[in-house]
Image (cartoon, rainbow, N blue to C red):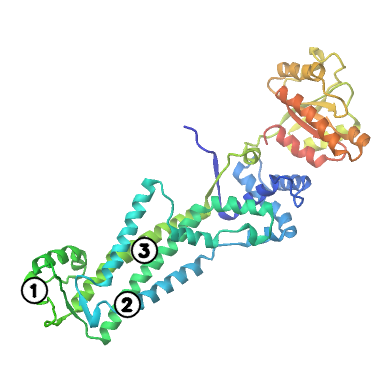
Amino acid sequence: MSTTPSISLDERSARQVLLLRAYETAEPPDSAWTTEDRDWATRVARASLPEDPAPERFIAERARHAMQRLAPRETGVRAALGAHFAGGAWVAVAVVLGLLLGLAVDHIGPAQRINLLAPPIWALVAWNLLVYLALLVKPLLGKGPGRLRRWLRARWQPKGGRWGRHATLARFAADWARVAAPLDGARAALVLHLGSAALALGVIVGMYVRGLVLDYSAGWESTFLGAETVHGLLSVLLAPASALTGVPIPDAAALAAMQVGPARPAQASAAPWLHLYAATLALFVIAPRLVLALLARLQVWRLHRRLPLAADDAWFRQWLQPRKSLAGTVWLLPHAAPASATAALALQEALQSASQGRARLQAAPPVPYGEEADAAHTTPPPDTALVLVLVDLASTPEEEVHGRLLDRLATSAQAARRVLLADEARYRQRLGHDEATLGARRRAWQALADAHGTTLLSLDLGTDPAALQVAFQGALGG
Protein backbone atom coordinates (compact mmCIF):
# COMPACT_ATOMS: atom_id res chain seq x y z
CA MET A 1 0.00 0.00 0.00
CA SER A 2 1.55 3.33 -1.07
CA THR A 3 1.73 6.24 1.32
CA THR A 4 1.97 9.95 0.63
CA PRO A 5 5.56 11.16 1.18
CA SER A 6 5.83 13.75 3.90
CA ILE A 7 8.33 15.76 5.90
CA SER A 8 8.12 17.27 9.38
CA LEU A 9 9.17 20.82 10.23
CA ASP A 10 8.65 23.11 13.17
CA GLU A 11 5.66 25.43 12.86
CA ARG A 12 7.60 28.53 11.84
CA SER A 13 9.69 26.69 9.24
CA ALA A 14 6.60 24.99 7.83
CA ARG A 15 4.91 28.38 7.46
CA GLN A 16 7.97 29.78 5.63
CA VAL A 17 8.24 26.76 3.33
CA LEU A 18 4.58 26.95 2.31
CA LEU A 19 4.88 30.69 1.71
CA LEU A 20 7.89 30.15 -0.54
CA ARG A 21 6.17 27.33 -2.40
CA ALA A 22 3.16 29.57 -3.04
CA TYR A 23 5.42 32.18 -4.65
CA GLU A 24 7.54 29.73 -6.64
CA THR A 25 4.55 27.85 -8.07
CA ALA A 26 2.35 30.87 -8.75
CA GLU A 27 0.71 30.95 -12.18
CA PRO A 28 1.42 33.35 -13.73
CA PRO A 29 4.77 33.82 -11.94
CA ASP A 30 4.66 36.35 -9.12
CA SER A 31 6.84 39.35 -9.92
CA ALA A 32 7.83 39.71 -6.27
CA TRP A 33 9.99 36.57 -6.50
CA THR A 34 12.21 36.23 -9.56
CA THR A 35 14.48 33.53 -10.94
CA GLU A 36 17.47 35.47 -9.62
CA ASP A 37 15.89 35.45 -6.15
CA ARG A 38 15.42 31.68 -6.32
CA ASP A 39 19.04 31.11 -7.26
CA TRP A 40 20.20 33.48 -4.52
CA ALA A 41 18.18 31.66 -1.85
CA THR A 42 19.54 28.32 -3.06
CA ARG A 43 23.17 29.48 -3.00
CA VAL A 44 22.90 31.10 0.42
CA ALA A 45 21.20 28.05 1.92
CA ARG A 46 23.89 25.73 0.60
CA ALA A 47 26.63 28.02 1.84
CA SER A 48 25.13 28.22 5.35
CA LEU A 49 24.72 24.46 5.81
CA PRO A 50 27.28 21.69 6.22
CA GLU A 51 27.98 19.41 3.30
CA ASP A 52 25.09 17.17 2.21
CA PRO A 53 22.46 18.32 4.74
CA ALA A 54 19.21 16.46 5.27
CA PRO A 55 16.65 17.48 2.61
CA GLU A 56 14.23 18.82 5.27
CA ARG A 57 16.94 21.01 6.73
CA PHE A 58 17.92 22.36 3.33
CA ILE A 59 14.40 23.26 2.29
CA ALA A 60 13.75 24.97 5.63
CA GLU A 61 16.99 26.93 5.44
CA ARG A 62 16.28 27.99 1.87
CA ALA A 63 12.81 29.23 2.84
CA ARG A 64 14.22 31.10 5.84
CA HIS A 65 16.64 33.03 3.65
CA ALA A 66 13.95 33.61 1.02
CA MET A 67 11.74 35.32 3.57
CA GLN A 68 14.55 37.81 4.21
CA ARG A 69 14.00 39.11 0.68
CA LEU A 70 10.27 38.58 0.36
CA ALA A 71 9.17 40.12 3.66
CA PRO A 72 10.52 43.65 2.98
CA ARG A 73 8.81 43.63 -0.43
CA GLU A 74 5.41 42.23 0.51
CA THR A 75 3.31 43.52 3.39
CA GLY A 76 1.24 40.36 3.29
CA VAL A 77 4.32 38.19 3.75
CA ARG A 78 5.32 40.16 6.84
CA ALA A 79 1.82 39.73 8.24
CA ALA A 80 1.80 36.01 7.46
CA LEU A 81 5.14 35.48 9.16
CA GLY A 82 4.17 37.59 12.16
CA ALA A 83 0.83 35.85 12.72
CA HIS A 84 0.94 33.56 15.74
CA PHE A 85 -1.43 31.78 18.08
CA ALA A 86 -2.02 33.77 21.28
CA GLY A 87 -2.32 30.60 23.32
CA GLY A 88 -2.02 32.18 26.76
CA ALA A 89 -4.72 34.74 26.02
CA TRP A 90 -7.19 32.17 24.69
CA VAL A 91 -6.63 29.86 27.66
CA ALA A 92 -7.01 32.75 30.11
CA VAL A 93 -10.27 33.85 28.49
CA ALA A 94 -11.65 30.29 28.55
CA VAL A 95 -10.74 29.76 32.21
CA VAL A 96 -12.09 33.12 33.37
CA LEU A 97 -15.34 32.70 31.45
CA GLY A 98 -15.74 29.17 32.77
CA LEU A 99 -15.24 30.27 36.37
CA LEU A 100 -17.62 33.20 36.04
CA LEU A 101 -20.28 31.07 34.41
CA GLY A 102 -19.96 28.46 37.15
CA LEU A 103 -20.16 31.09 39.87
CA ALA A 104 -23.15 32.67 38.14
CA VAL A 105 -25.25 29.57 38.72
CA ASP A 106 -27.51 31.21 41.32
CA HIS A 107 -28.83 28.06 42.95
CA ILE A 108 -28.52 24.29 43.01
CA GLY A 109 -32.14 23.82 43.94
CA PRO A 110 -35.30 25.90 44.32
CA ALA A 111 -35.84 27.92 47.51
CA GLN A 112 -32.47 26.96 49.02
CA ARG A 113 -33.43 23.27 48.79
CA ILE A 114 -31.50 20.60 46.94
CA ASN A 115 -33.67 18.10 45.10
CA LEU A 116 -31.41 15.06 45.33
CA LEU A 117 -32.79 13.62 42.11
CA ALA A 118 -32.56 16.71 39.94
CA PRO A 119 -29.80 19.17 40.79
CA PRO A 120 -28.31 21.03 37.77
CA ILE A 121 -25.04 19.27 38.55
CA TRP A 122 -26.34 16.08 36.98
CA ALA A 123 -26.90 17.93 33.69
CA LEU A 124 -23.29 19.12 33.74
CA VAL A 125 -22.00 15.62 34.49
CA ALA A 126 -24.21 14.07 31.80
CA TRP A 127 -23.03 16.60 29.21
CA ASN A 128 -19.39 15.86 29.93
CA LEU A 129 -19.95 12.11 29.77
CA LEU A 130 -21.52 12.58 26.34
CA VAL A 131 -18.46 14.60 25.27
CA TYR A 132 -16.13 11.82 26.41
CA LEU A 133 -18.21 9.28 24.52
CA ALA A 134 -18.09 11.43 21.39
CA LEU A 135 -14.31 11.74 21.67
CA LEU A 136 -14.07 7.95 21.75
CA VAL A 137 -16.54 7.28 18.95
CA LYS A 138 -15.67 10.00 16.44
CA PRO A 139 -12.28 8.57 15.41
CA LEU A 140 -13.92 5.18 14.84
CA LEU A 141 -16.55 6.79 12.64
CA GLY A 142 -14.01 8.92 10.80
CA LYS A 143 -15.69 12.15 11.83
CA GLY A 144 -13.82 15.41 12.28
CA PRO A 145 -13.91 17.89 15.14
CA GLY A 146 -17.18 19.34 16.42
CA ARG A 147 -18.65 22.70 15.55
CA LEU A 148 -17.25 24.56 18.55
CA ARG A 149 -13.74 23.29 17.92
CA ARG A 150 -14.01 24.17 14.23
CA TRP A 151 -15.22 27.65 15.17
CA LEU A 152 -12.24 28.17 17.48
CA ARG A 153 -9.82 26.93 14.81
CA ALA A 154 -11.27 29.37 12.31
CA ARG A 155 -10.63 32.28 14.69
CA TRP A 156 -6.86 31.94 14.48
CA GLN A 157 -6.38 30.47 10.99
CA PRO A 158 -5.03 32.99 8.44
CA LYS A 159 -7.33 34.50 5.85
CA GLY A 160 -5.95 35.50 2.45
CA GLY A 161 -7.95 38.73 2.45
CA ARG A 162 -6.47 39.68 5.77
CA TRP A 163 -3.16 40.38 4.02
CA GLY A 164 -4.60 42.01 0.94
CA ARG A 165 -6.33 40.65 -2.14
CA HIS A 166 -3.36 38.67 -3.36
CA ALA A 167 -3.80 35.34 -5.14
CA THR A 168 -0.43 33.99 -3.99
CA LEU A 169 -1.13 34.75 -0.35
CA ALA A 170 -4.68 33.44 -0.65
CA ARG A 171 -3.29 30.14 -1.86
CA PHE A 172 -0.83 30.07 1.02
CA ALA A 173 -3.66 30.74 3.47
CA ALA A 174 -5.61 27.76 2.10
CA ASP A 175 -2.54 25.51 2.20
CA TRP A 176 -1.65 26.58 5.73
CA ALA A 177 -5.20 26.07 7.03
CA ARG A 178 -5.06 22.49 5.75
CA VAL A 179 -1.58 21.74 7.08
CA ALA A 180 -2.12 23.41 10.47
CA ALA A 181 -5.56 21.84 11.06
CA PRO A 182 -4.23 19.14 13.45
CA LEU A 183 -2.23 21.72 15.41
CA ASP A 184 -5.09 24.19 15.59
CA GLY A 185 -7.46 21.38 16.51
CA ALA A 186 -5.23 20.42 19.44
CA ARG A 187 -5.11 24.06 20.54
CA ALA A 188 -8.89 24.31 20.35
CA ALA A 189 -9.21 21.12 22.40
CA LEU A 190 -6.85 22.55 25.03
CA VAL A 191 -8.93 25.72 25.33
CA LEU A 192 -12.24 23.84 25.55
CA HIS A 193 -11.04 21.28 28.10
CA LEU A 194 -9.61 23.94 30.41
CA GLY A 195 -12.75 26.06 30.02
CA SER A 196 -14.95 23.08 30.93
CA ALA A 197 -12.82 22.25 33.97
CA ALA A 198 -13.03 25.89 35.06
CA LEU A 199 -16.82 25.82 34.68
CA ALA A 200 -17.11 22.83 37.01
CA LEU A 201 -14.70 24.44 39.47
CA GLY A 202 -16.80 27.60 39.42
CA VAL A 203 -19.91 25.58 40.25
CA ILE A 204 -18.13 23.94 43.21
CA VAL A 205 -16.83 27.25 44.53
CA GLY A 206 -20.27 28.79 44.12
CA MET A 207 -21.90 25.95 46.08
CA TYR A 208 -19.57 26.28 49.02
CA VAL A 209 -19.65 30.10 49.06
CA ARG A 210 -23.44 30.09 49.13
CA GLY A 211 -23.40 27.32 51.71
CA LEU A 212 -21.47 29.62 54.02
CA VAL A 213 -24.09 32.37 53.99
CA LEU A 214 -27.30 30.42 53.20
CA ASP A 215 -28.97 27.51 54.92
CA TYR A 216 -29.56 24.80 52.32
CA SER A 217 -31.67 21.76 53.07
CA ALA A 218 -31.89 18.50 51.12
CA GLY A 219 -34.80 16.31 50.10
CA TRP A 220 -36.35 14.53 47.17
CA GLU A 221 -39.74 14.11 45.58
CA SER A 222 -41.05 11.80 42.91
CA THR A 223 -44.38 10.62 41.62
CA PHE A 224 -43.17 7.18 40.59
CA LEU A 225 -40.09 6.32 42.68
CA GLY A 226 -40.03 5.03 46.21
CA ALA A 227 -37.36 5.32 48.88
CA GLU A 228 -35.80 1.92 48.01
CA THR A 229 -35.44 2.86 44.36
CA VAL A 230 -34.05 6.29 45.19
CA HIS A 231 -31.51 4.69 47.56
CA GLY A 232 -30.36 2.28 44.85
CA LEU A 233 -30.09 5.05 42.28
CA LEU A 234 -28.12 7.43 44.49
CA SER A 235 -25.91 4.59 45.74
CA VAL A 236 -24.80 3.95 42.17
CA LEU A 237 -24.49 7.56 41.01
CA LEU A 238 -22.68 8.82 44.08
CA ALA A 239 -20.64 5.72 44.88
CA PRO A 240 -17.32 7.14 43.53
CA ALA A 241 -17.83 10.42 45.40
CA SER A 242 -18.77 8.54 48.59
CA ALA A 243 -15.64 6.42 48.35
CA LEU A 244 -13.50 9.54 47.81
CA THR A 245 -14.99 11.67 50.57
CA GLY A 246 -16.00 8.99 53.07
CA VAL A 247 -19.49 10.48 53.24
CA PRO A 248 -21.98 7.57 53.33
CA ILE A 249 -25.18 7.40 51.33
CA PRO A 250 -28.18 7.32 53.76
CA ASP A 251 -30.13 4.07 53.83
CA ALA A 252 -33.65 3.69 52.45
CA ALA A 253 -35.30 4.53 55.79
CA ALA A 254 -33.34 7.75 56.14
CA LEU A 255 -34.15 8.69 52.56
CA ALA A 256 -37.85 7.96 53.17
CA ALA A 257 -37.76 10.54 55.96
CA MET A 258 -36.22 13.05 53.52
CA GLN A 259 -39.07 12.76 51.00
CA VAL A 260 -40.80 16.13 50.68
CA GLY A 261 -44.25 17.18 49.64
CA PRO A 262 -46.68 20.10 49.95
CA ALA A 263 -46.99 19.57 53.70
CA ARG A 264 -43.51 18.17 54.28
CA PRO A 265 -40.74 20.73 53.59
CA ALA A 266 -37.12 19.63 53.36
CA GLN A 267 -35.34 19.78 56.69
CA ALA A 268 -32.24 17.55 56.36
CA SER A 269 -28.89 19.29 56.22
CA ALA A 270 -27.48 19.66 52.68
CA ALA A 271 -23.83 19.77 53.83
CA PRO A 272 -23.00 16.07 53.20
CA TRP A 273 -24.73 16.22 49.83
CA LEU A 274 -22.71 19.30 48.82
CA HIS A 275 -19.54 17.33 49.53
CA LEU A 276 -20.82 14.41 47.45
CA TYR A 277 -21.81 16.58 44.51
CA ALA A 278 -18.55 18.53 44.64
CA ALA A 279 -16.59 15.27 44.60
CA THR A 280 -18.74 14.02 41.70
CA LEU A 281 -17.88 17.10 39.66
CA ALA A 282 -14.21 16.70 40.54
CA LEU A 283 -14.18 13.03 39.53
CA PHE A 284 -16.29 13.19 36.36
CA VAL A 285 -15.58 16.68 35.03
CA ILE A 286 -12.52 18.40 36.46
CA ALA A 287 -10.11 15.45 36.59
CA PRO A 288 -10.93 14.01 33.13
CA ARG A 289 -10.90 17.45 31.54
CA LEU A 290 -7.50 18.22 33.03
CA VAL A 291 -6.15 14.92 31.74
CA LEU A 292 -7.55 15.66 28.27
CA ALA A 293 -6.10 19.17 28.46
CA LEU A 294 -2.69 17.70 29.29
CA LEU A 295 -2.91 15.32 26.34
CA ALA A 296 -3.94 18.21 24.08
CA ARG A 297 -1.03 20.28 25.38
CA LEU A 298 1.40 17.45 24.64
CA GLN A 299 -0.04 17.17 21.14
CA VAL A 300 0.34 20.93 20.64
CA TRP A 301 3.96 20.71 21.79
CA ARG A 302 4.67 17.78 19.47
CA LEU A 303 3.05 19.31 16.40
CA HIS A 304 4.58 22.73 17.08
CA ARG A 305 7.99 21.06 16.89
CA ARG A 306 7.26 18.58 14.08
CA LEU A 307 4.32 19.57 11.88
CA PRO A 308 3.80 17.09 8.99
CA LEU A 309 3.72 18.47 5.43
CA ALA A 310 2.68 16.38 2.45
CA ALA A 311 5.61 16.45 0.02
CA ASP A 312 3.99 14.80 -2.97
CA ASP A 313 4.04 17.59 -5.55
CA ALA A 314 6.70 18.56 -8.09
CA TRP A 315 7.98 21.52 -6.07
CA PHE A 316 8.75 19.41 -3.03
CA ARG A 317 10.25 16.61 -5.11
CA GLN A 318 12.59 19.12 -6.74
CA TRP A 319 14.04 20.35 -3.46
CA LEU A 320 13.74 17.27 -1.26
CA GLN A 321 15.49 14.72 -3.42
CA PRO A 322 18.82 13.53 -1.97
CA ARG A 323 21.56 16.05 -2.69
CA LYS A 324 24.60 14.26 -4.04
CA SER A 325 28.09 15.64 -3.92
CA LEU A 326 29.57 16.56 -7.28
CA ALA A 327 32.91 14.76 -7.50
CA GLY A 328 35.06 13.17 -10.19
CA THR A 329 35.46 14.19 -13.82
CA VAL A 330 32.99 16.46 -15.56
CA TRP A 331 33.47 15.74 -19.25
CA LEU A 332 32.63 18.67 -21.50
CA LEU A 333 31.77 17.39 -24.97
CA PRO A 334 31.06 20.21 -27.45
CA HIS A 335 29.23 19.47 -30.67
CA ALA A 336 30.37 20.88 -34.00
CA ALA A 337 32.35 23.77 -32.47
CA PRO A 338 34.61 24.18 -29.43
CA ALA A 339 33.41 25.96 -26.34
CA SER A 340 34.13 29.68 -26.27
CA ALA A 341 36.67 30.95 -23.78
CA THR A 342 33.91 32.75 -21.89
CA ALA A 343 31.81 29.59 -21.66
CA ALA A 344 34.77 27.44 -20.60
CA LEU A 345 35.75 29.92 -17.88
CA ALA A 346 32.16 30.15 -16.59
CA LEU A 347 31.90 26.36 -16.49
CA GLN A 348 35.19 26.01 -14.65
CA GLU A 349 34.30 28.62 -12.01
CA ALA A 350 30.82 27.26 -11.45
CA LEU A 351 32.16 23.72 -11.19
CA GLN A 352 34.76 24.67 -8.60
CA SER A 353 32.21 26.53 -6.52
CA ALA A 354 29.56 23.81 -6.71
CA SER A 355 31.91 20.92 -5.89
CA GLN A 356 34.26 22.68 -3.43
CA GLY A 357 37.13 21.59 -5.65
CA ARG A 358 36.23 17.87 -5.68
CA ALA A 359 35.33 17.77 -9.39
CA ARG A 360 37.50 18.67 -12.35
CA LEU A 361 36.47 19.82 -15.79
CA GLN A 362 37.96 18.00 -18.75
CA ALA A 363 37.14 19.38 -22.17
CA ALA A 364 37.07 17.04 -25.16
CA PRO A 365 37.61 18.03 -28.80
CA PRO A 366 34.30 18.91 -30.46
CA VAL A 367 32.37 16.08 -32.10
CA PRO A 368 32.45 16.78 -35.86
CA TYR A 369 29.09 17.14 -37.52
CA GLY A 370 28.07 13.74 -38.93
CA GLU A 371 30.40 11.71 -36.67
CA GLU A 372 28.10 11.57 -33.64
CA ALA A 373 28.15 7.76 -33.49
CA ASP A 374 31.96 7.48 -33.69
CA ALA A 375 33.34 5.90 -30.50
CA ALA A 376 36.57 7.85 -30.90
CA HIS A 377 34.68 11.05 -30.15
CA THR A 378 32.10 9.80 -27.63
CA THR A 379 33.98 7.66 -25.09
CA PRO A 380 34.43 9.53 -21.78
CA PRO A 381 37.26 9.05 -19.23
CA PRO A 382 36.73 6.11 -16.84
CA ASP A 383 35.94 8.21 -13.73
CA THR A 384 33.44 10.52 -15.43
CA ALA A 385 30.58 11.54 -13.13
CA LEU A 386 28.86 13.99 -15.46
CA VAL A 387 28.83 14.43 -19.22
CA LEU A 388 27.98 17.91 -20.48
CA VAL A 389 27.01 17.85 -24.15
CA LEU A 390 27.49 21.47 -25.17
CA VAL A 391 25.38 22.76 -28.05
CA ASP A 392 24.52 26.20 -29.34
CA LEU A 393 20.88 27.09 -28.72
CA ALA A 394 20.96 28.90 -32.06
CA SER A 395 21.24 25.49 -33.75
CA THR A 396 18.12 23.61 -34.70
CA PRO A 397 17.86 20.31 -32.80
CA GLU A 398 18.05 17.35 -35.18
CA GLU A 399 17.06 13.82 -34.22
CA GLU A 400 19.44 12.20 -36.68
CA VAL A 401 22.36 14.33 -35.42
CA HIS A 402 21.93 15.40 -31.82
CA GLY A 403 19.58 12.52 -31.00
CA ARG A 404 22.11 10.02 -32.34
CA LEU A 405 24.84 11.62 -30.20
CA LEU A 406 22.72 11.31 -27.05
CA ASP A 407 21.90 7.69 -27.86
CA ARG A 408 25.59 6.92 -28.35
CA LEU A 409 26.45 8.48 -24.97
CA ALA A 410 23.71 6.46 -23.30
CA THR A 411 25.82 3.42 -24.21
CA SER A 412 29.36 4.74 -23.84
CA ALA A 413 28.72 6.73 -20.62
CA GLN A 414 26.22 4.54 -18.80
CA ALA A 415 27.71 5.20 -15.35
CA ALA A 416 27.60 9.00 -15.70
CA ARG A 417 24.77 11.49 -15.65
CA ARG A 418 24.21 13.06 -19.05
CA VAL A 419 23.18 16.69 -19.44
CA LEU A 420 22.45 18.55 -22.65
CA LEU A 421 23.84 22.07 -22.06
CA ALA A 422 22.49 24.66 -24.50
CA ASP A 423 24.44 27.93 -24.53
CA GLU A 424 22.04 30.84 -25.17
CA ALA A 425 24.71 33.54 -25.56
CA ARG A 426 24.83 33.77 -29.39
CA TYR A 427 21.10 33.29 -29.82
CA ARG A 428 20.36 36.08 -27.34
CA GLN A 429 22.71 38.41 -29.19
CA ARG A 430 20.86 37.69 -32.41
CA LEU A 431 17.31 37.93 -31.00
CA GLY A 432 17.70 40.74 -28.50
CA HIS A 433 14.67 40.67 -26.20
CA ASP A 434 12.53 38.32 -28.28
CA GLU A 435 11.64 35.99 -25.42
CA ALA A 436 8.87 34.26 -27.39
CA THR A 437 11.26 32.97 -30.05
CA LEU A 438 13.83 32.07 -27.42
CA GLY A 439 11.22 30.11 -25.48
CA ALA A 440 10.13 28.22 -28.60
CA ARG A 441 13.71 27.15 -29.32
CA ARG A 442 14.16 26.03 -25.71
CA ARG A 443 11.03 23.91 -25.98
CA ALA A 444 12.37 22.28 -29.15
CA TRP A 445 15.59 21.29 -27.39
CA GLN A 446 13.63 20.17 -24.35
CA ALA A 447 11.55 17.84 -26.50
CA LEU A 448 14.73 16.29 -27.90
CA ALA A 449 16.24 15.88 -24.42
CA ASP A 450 13.05 14.32 -23.09
CA ALA A 451 12.90 11.89 -25.98
CA HIS A 452 16.36 10.59 -25.06
CA GLY A 453 16.05 10.64 -21.28
CA THR A 454 18.48 13.51 -20.84
CA THR A 455 18.38 16.62 -18.68
CA LEU A 456 18.39 19.95 -20.52
CA LEU A 457 20.08 23.05 -19.11
CA SER A 458 19.54 26.14 -21.26
CA LEU A 459 21.65 29.05 -19.99
CA ASP A 460 23.57 32.08 -21.09
CA LEU A 461 27.04 30.90 -20.10
CA GLY A 462 28.45 34.38 -20.50
CA THR A 463 26.14 36.25 -18.13
CA ASP A 464 24.48 33.65 -15.88
CA PRO A 465 27.24 32.03 -13.77
CA ALA A 466 25.09 31.89 -10.63
CA ALA A 467 22.38 29.92 -12.41
CA LEU A 468 25.05 27.63 -13.82
CA GLN A 469 26.35 26.85 -10.34
CA VAL A 470 22.86 25.92 -9.22
CA ALA A 471 22.47 23.83 -12.36
CA PHE A 472 25.53 21.75 -11.56
CA GLN A 473 23.98 20.77 -8.26
CA GLY A 474 20.67 19.98 -9.91
CA ALA A 475 22.35 17.90 -12.59
CA LEU A 476 23.28 15.27 -10.01
CA GLY A 477 19.98 15.35 -8.17
CA GLY A 478 20.97 18.09 -5.75
- Dot 2 or dot 1: first in sequence order is 2
Would residue 32 be visible to someone looking at this image? Answer: yes
Of residues 202 and 331, the one drawn nearer to the viewer in this rendering: 202
Of residues 367 and 457, the one drawn nearer to the viewer in this rendering: 457
- Dot 3 or dot 1: first in sequence order is 1
Spatial CA span between label 2 and label 1: 30 Å
Residue 249 relative to residue 61: left or right: left
Question: Residue 170: percent from the left, percent from the top?
Answer: 64, 54
**Which element is circle 3 on?**
helix
Q: Which residue is mark 1?
A: 256
Q: Which residue is mark 2?
A: 205
Residue 61 against residue 458 in the figure, above or below: below
Residue extending farthest left = 253
Residue at the location (11% across, 72% down)? 250
Question: Residue 337: percent from the left, percent from the top?
Answer: 89, 23
Q: Name which quarter of the figure residue 387 lies in.
A: top right
Of residues 375 and 132, the one drawn nearer to the viewer in this rendering: 132
- Kind of residue sitting beneath label 3: Leu
Q: Name which quarter of the figure residue 239 lies in.
A: bottom left
- Kind of residue sitting beneath label 1: Ala
Residue 414 relative to residue 237: left or right: right
- Dot 2 or dot 3: first in sequence order is 2
Q: Which residue is mark 3?
A: 290
* Front tag of 3 and 1: 1
Question: Residue 259: percent from the left, percent from the top?
Answer: 12, 75
